[in-house]
């Protein structure tokens, strides 16, 4: 059993690394160091984050002796190799999504993790909004009745102009899919988790509305090291990854659904919205207003507020602030990381598999397979069966 605080190292120092850092600290871990795209950027990040050291490279960070757990928060194309190196070096791994840029690589990581006995988790953190957990509990408890329709969207606008650019646009760094892998994957993970249905077949239309981009990789969000790693400068860059995707799907339990994913919807910042319509009621969750759920029925509509006294046990567990004190995205990371670290401690003390509450490499591999199905369907303009 690990008695001392877990030792954590974070590869990458951009927007999401900062969330991992804060969540690790909230969970009582000792964050030993960080790295970025160059040793100099790594040093600057260590200072900015108040950390004792930086690593010259991500490879050194994930394989060295300094950490028990490594968080991989680098651009997508590096995830497979870094996660593989980390697992082979005996580290527990929190790897950002997408777990890999091909299904074969994602499946290989699932196998490697399974054989290692190590904890291997992926932050599909929207599951950690208490009201998303409440939606899941209600759907599983029969509140909506038989699920008939599942629909929604995930819309952003930060890549809607020709001058907007980022490493995600470049398939060598982001992978063959951009909008779907980046945000559509979150929607699918959340909707499958809430509904208990699996998307079994789909037909997709993908659009690249801006075939040339002129920016040199503006910062993704705020933060001095965000966006670093995008190589193009000046001139126009030809774009091959999709800006938007429309998906029509069927599920393994007889429902149908639609999903719109876009990074070019002006005014929409991070609008992940979903609705599940059953025989007796509907439930809708809006990530930008995560403190309530819409519950609709012919008998009347209601807005269910987050109040632990009225919530299911899992939603109440995640509800760490009193009602009326808004929780949000950073709290989701904190809840996720706390569960992962608890599982690491349990593993270390019992040597046995625990049933994880958090999304695993297996869940993440599924979203990589869904992404591949979307790209294949868009290319072939046909329905595709999604491998289970
Ligand atoms: N789970 C979520 O909700 C969520 C949210 C945002 C991003 N992400 C994922 O996190 C990852 C990072 O995204 P971001 O928004 O933080 O990007 P970002 O551009 O803000 O930061 C990327 C960081 O990686 C570093 N980097 C680049 N190449 C590197 C290398 N070879 N070695 C070490 N560091 C390197 C850069 O210096 C930078 O600090 C992506 O895979 C993204 O999909 C997940």
Image (cartoon, rainbow, N blue to C red):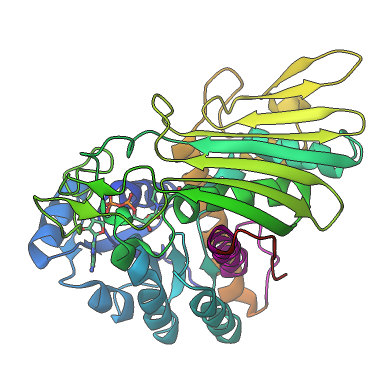
Q: Pick the residue in front: 40 or 100.
A: 100
Residue 379 in picture, x, y percent from top left: 53, 62
Q: Quadrant of residue 101?
A: bottom left
- Asked whether the viewer can see residue 128, the reply is no
Q: Pick the residue in front: 314 or 167.
A: 167
Report the quarter where the C terminus lies: bottom right
Q: Quadrant of residue 214?
A: top left
On the rendering, which quadrant does ligand 1 occupy? bottom left
Residue 212 in picture, x, y percent from top left: 25, 48
Q: Is residue 192 left or right of residue 37?
A: right
- Asked whether the viewer can see residue 248, the reply is yes
355 drawn magenta? yes
Residue plotted at (62% across, 63% down) = 363
Q: Is residue 353 left or right of residue 328?
A: right
Residue plotted at (42% across, 66% down) = 4
Residue 28 in picture, x, y percent from top left: 42, 53
């Amino acid at each position: 059993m690990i008695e001392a605080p877990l030792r954590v190292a974070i590869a990458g120092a951009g927007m999401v690394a900062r969330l991992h850092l804060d969540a690790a600290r909230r969970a009582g871990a000792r964050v030993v160091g960080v790295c970025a795209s160059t040793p100099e950027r790594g040093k600057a990040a260590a200072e900015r984050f108040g950390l004792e050291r930086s690593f010259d490279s991500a490879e050194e960070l994930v394989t060295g002796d300094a950490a028990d757990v490594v968080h991989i928060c680098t651009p997508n194309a590096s995830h497979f190799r870094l996660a593989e190196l980390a697992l082979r070096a005996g580290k527990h791994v929190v790897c950002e999504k997408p777990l890999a840029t091909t299904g074969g690589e994602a499946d290989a990581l699932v196998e490697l993790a399974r054989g290692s006995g190590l904890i291997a988790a992926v932050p599909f953190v929207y599951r950690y909004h208490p009201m998303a957990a409440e939606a899941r509990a209600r759907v599983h408890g029969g509140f909506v009745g038989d699920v008939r329709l599942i629909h929604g969207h995930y819309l952003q606008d930060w890549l809607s102009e020709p001058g907007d650019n980022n490493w995600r646009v470049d398939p060598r760094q982001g992978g063959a899919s951009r909008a779907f892998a980046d945000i559509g994957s979150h929607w699918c993970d959340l909707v499958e988790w809430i509904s208990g249905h699996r998307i079994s077949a789909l037909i997709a239309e993908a659009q690249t509305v801006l075939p040339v981009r002129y920016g040199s990789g503006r910062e993704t969000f705020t933060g001095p090291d965000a966006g670093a790693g995008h190589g193009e400068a000046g001139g126009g860059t030809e774009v091959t990854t999709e800006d938007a995707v429309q998906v029509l799907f069927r599920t393994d339990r007889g429902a149908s659904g639609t999903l719109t994913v876009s990074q070019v919807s002006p005014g929409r910042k991070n609008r992940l919205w979903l609705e599940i319509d059953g025989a007796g009621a509907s439930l809708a969750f809006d990530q930008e207003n995560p403190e309530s759920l819409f519950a609709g029925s012919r008998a009347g509509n209601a807005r269910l507020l987050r109040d632990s006294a009225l919530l299911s046990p899992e939603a109440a567990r995640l509800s760490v602030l009193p009602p009326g004190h808004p929780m949000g995205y950073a709290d989701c990371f904190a809840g996720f990381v706390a569960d992962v670290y608890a599982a690491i401690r349990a593993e270390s003390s019992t040597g046995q598999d625990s049933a994880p509450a958090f999304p695993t490499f297996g869940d993440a591999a599924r979203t990589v397979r869904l992404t591949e199905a979307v790209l294949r369907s868009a290319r072939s303009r046909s329905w595709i069966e999604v491998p289970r």
